[in-house]
Image (cartoon, rainbow, N blue to C red):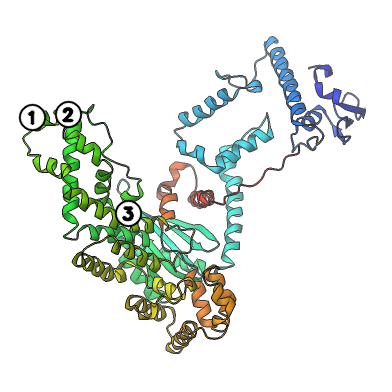
Amino acid sequence: MPSESDKWGWKHVSVFGGFDKGSGTKKWKCNHCNLRYNGSYSRVRAHLLGFSGVGVKGCPAIDRSLREAFQILEEERVSRRKKRTTGTGKHTKRVRTSRPNLSCVAKEDVDEILARFFFADGLNATIINSPYFHEMIKAVTAFGPGYEPPSMHELYDCFLSKEKERIEKSVALVRESLPHTGCTLLCVGRLDGMLGSFQVNIFVSSPRGLSFLKAITVNNVEVTGNSVAGVLSNAIMEVEPTNVVQIISHLGHTNTFSESHILSEFPHIFWSPCTSNSIRILMEEIAELDWIKPVILWAKDIEKCMITFQRCYPSVFTLNLKGSSESLFARIASSCYVVQKLLELKQEFQEVVLREEWKQWKLSIAEDVESVEAAILGEDFWSRAHLLSQICEPFVRFFAVLNIDRCVMGDVHEWRIQAFDAVKSKGIDTVAMNQLEVLIENRWDVLFSPLHSAAYILNPRYFGRGQAKDKIIMRGWKTTLEGYECDSASRRVLREQLSSYLRLEGSLGEEDAVDCRDKMDPVAWWENFGFEVPQLQTLAIKVLSQVSSVTMCEEIWQDNGNLCQEPATGLGLERMEDLVYVQNNLKLQGHKSDFHAPHLTTET
């Protein structure tokens, strides 16, 4: 047993006596802060080194430099004790591995051990960017030497239950606001070809935040639509039907059956397309216009030709022609993206086709590439490509602002108008412009929700934009009223109150109300100035509080595995579902820009 002289901490406290004879427990007072405690040397050490959780507080009078000096003394003490233990020839129960001495380890050694952990267990290295990973490292560091992690059983038992309970309390607070603002159910799904099953995740979005509700796996793909519709019905009942304003889904072939089933059961709920996906579809349809498609075909021929040349002369042309599938342009308009890539490489292409290697390569192949060369050296292709890029650019910007954390329902129509006005300013000839305008107008009703029209009328920021004369907007407003309110008398009241809003009657036309239209959040504006038209106020708040896209859900959605194969994981089905629930909600919380992890309470 080490002598008391080896325990440096006794020199920094005043001992008033012990308890039982031979006991290490003493009465002592810290010489630095004068706090008094009862306890053995482990408490003295914890007090001086700033540890908590052992019945004492860290000494508040010790600064950082002195604490670091104490840490060195402690490391030396531990090192001497280990040498004595080794000298006795006794064997410990721990398995020795080739690793640095953790009592005096350098940062480089710690980094190597951390990296080895990732490599050995096949973990995704992106975890290192997780805010939870960094909070874990800080917590272990704050605890200090001697921390022992919980067992796997503890993780999946008490700690999983505790975390689920914490998340449920947070979600319950959010749901308290749903009767006022309403919410959107967001559904994303995919077919797992390997397992032959369909996986669906359901989220709930409101102005208070986005939360994960549940996941399901349907093993019989033939009855997927029926199963998804049943799960959605249960989800609506769980959230309360009166709280659900709309459902936005990205479920592929199951959409049609699920939509018809839900709308028959809950006629007041809107089934809205995902705006992000609608823009993608619209951009692909624009790419098929007869004055745009030839440019894309030329671009693909040029790309194919240059890739073939690059394989033969990799040292002559080293630039990447493939581009990035993560590019925003590639995600919204994949057909047009090839044109954008070529525009960025115009100068390099023109330099390549003038080189001697290009001339030699032309003679060695069977294909005729003269037309490709002419397109690269001429200006006709590049001017058309530049025009196409200008047409796409406003829609790409439109796509970029669709963020699930923002209630953008009231802005979508305005963005459509701005994007179209930006395209008009590019100098496109009248015939082509009319063709583009007809396409967008004809597809709007199919690809976008009528709620976008209602929200555009009710958004005070866009008051006076002539909405009542726009047939697309008024058609959407009419559809919204018919879905929202089944009683014709109630619809008449809403129409009369809309007229009061448009005529600036009562509180809606007061000086403060007019002044605050573009200074306040639209929902807050209606809460403050819409009290004289209460039915319209309720509708406006609910419509303007909704999101328009499942983009973030798709980005955070992890592969939750196949719940039907849960026995292989060692967890029961209920525990597996709890794990998926906790995992997805934590990932959502970690993606919030205002994420704040729980602060650690440490005494300094």
Residue 591: percent from left, percent from top: 51, 49
Q: Residue at x 57, y 26 (%)?
A: 110
Front residue of 377 and 403: 377
Q: Quadrant of residue 30?
A: top right
| Residue 196 falls left or right of residue 414 | left
Q: Is residue 232 above or below residue 41?
A: below
Q: CA gap, disc 2 to disc 1?
A: 11 Å
Picture layout, residue 434 above or below residue 299: below
- Disc 1 target residue: 364
Outermost residue toward the right in this view: 16
Crowd rating for badge 1 (residues with CA inside 10 Å; few <14, some 14–19, many 20+): few
Under mark 1, the amino acid is Ser
- Is residue 269 shown above or below 142? below
Q: Can you tell which mark lies on residue 312?
A: 2
Q: Are marks 3 and 2 in contact (CB under 8 Å)?
A: no
User: Which of the two labelled residues, at mark 2 and mark 1, occupies the earlier sequence position?
Assistant: 2
Q: Secondary structure at mark 2?
A: helix
- Residue 68 sits in quarter: top right
Q: Is residue 160 left or right of residue 406?
A: right
Secondary structure at numbered mark 1: helix
Q: Which residue, given by chain and number where applicable, does mark 3 sit on? A: 332
Is residue 165 or residue 542 the one in the foreground?
542
148 or 210, which lies in front? Answer: 210
Q: Position of residue 481 (x, y in %)?
A: 41, 80
